[in-house]
Image: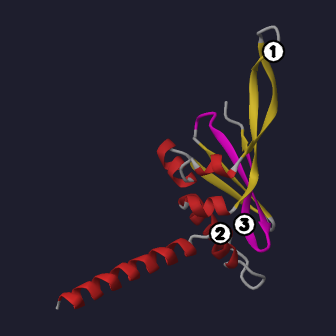
Amino acid sequence: MSESIVMIGDFLRLTTTALFTIGLFTQSPLIYAAECSASHQEVFADFFNRFSSEKKFAVSRTIYPLRVLLLEFGLNDKLEDDYSSSFKLKLTSKAEDSKYPSLGNYMNDNGLVAETNIKTRTTEVHVFKPDTDWSVMYRFLMKKHCWYLHEIEDDSL
């Protein structure tokens, strides 16, 4: 009887290990990329729902280094208000981006809403907080029938 308990325990341990390994495999970017093909062009709404809720998927569908344009607005050399604006380019690495929460969690935590402008090969998602200066544009492009984030423009003041 004790031999059968050991065998069942070994079986459960092996099964758990196998399921964990399969779970890791299905989270790989290669699996995500395989979902898109000439016969199955990705629908942006489906992609964005997954992109905004699953951080691992979002990282797998971001082109790095990620271009982040930051609006600079402030004082000139004489310490007077400078009403002209310029953008500072920041390149974000995969490791740095991975530290942040999913876009959906970020939006929920900060009361943000999104408006989407979908085109054939590019899409912009404007994430903002109504009645504030909080405004960030996420730019996506279609690459091999899959959507990828390729640029963020932060116009927030």
Task: Select label 2 or label 1 by which is in front.
Answer: 2
Find the distance from the CA under tag 2 to the CA under tag 1: 45 Å
Q: Position of residue 84 (x, y in %)?
A: 82, 24
Question: Circle 3 — which element?
Answer: strand
Q: Determine whether, in the image, residue 18 is placed left or right of residue 47.
A: left
Mark 2 sits on what residue? 29
Mark sitting on residue 147: 3
The count of marks equals 3
Magenta segment main secondary structure: strand
For image coordinates 54% across by 54% down, the residue present is 104
**Residue placed at 64% from the left, 73% from the top?**
32
- Magenta stretch: give its range: 131-152
Residue at 57% from the left image edge and 70% from the top image edge: 27
Cα distance, mark 3 to mark 2?
A: 13 Å
Identify the mark at residue 76; answer none if there is no mark.
1
Direction from residue 152 to residue 86 in the image, left or right: right
Of callouts 3 and 2, which one flags the residue occurring earlier in the amino acid sequence?
Answer: 2
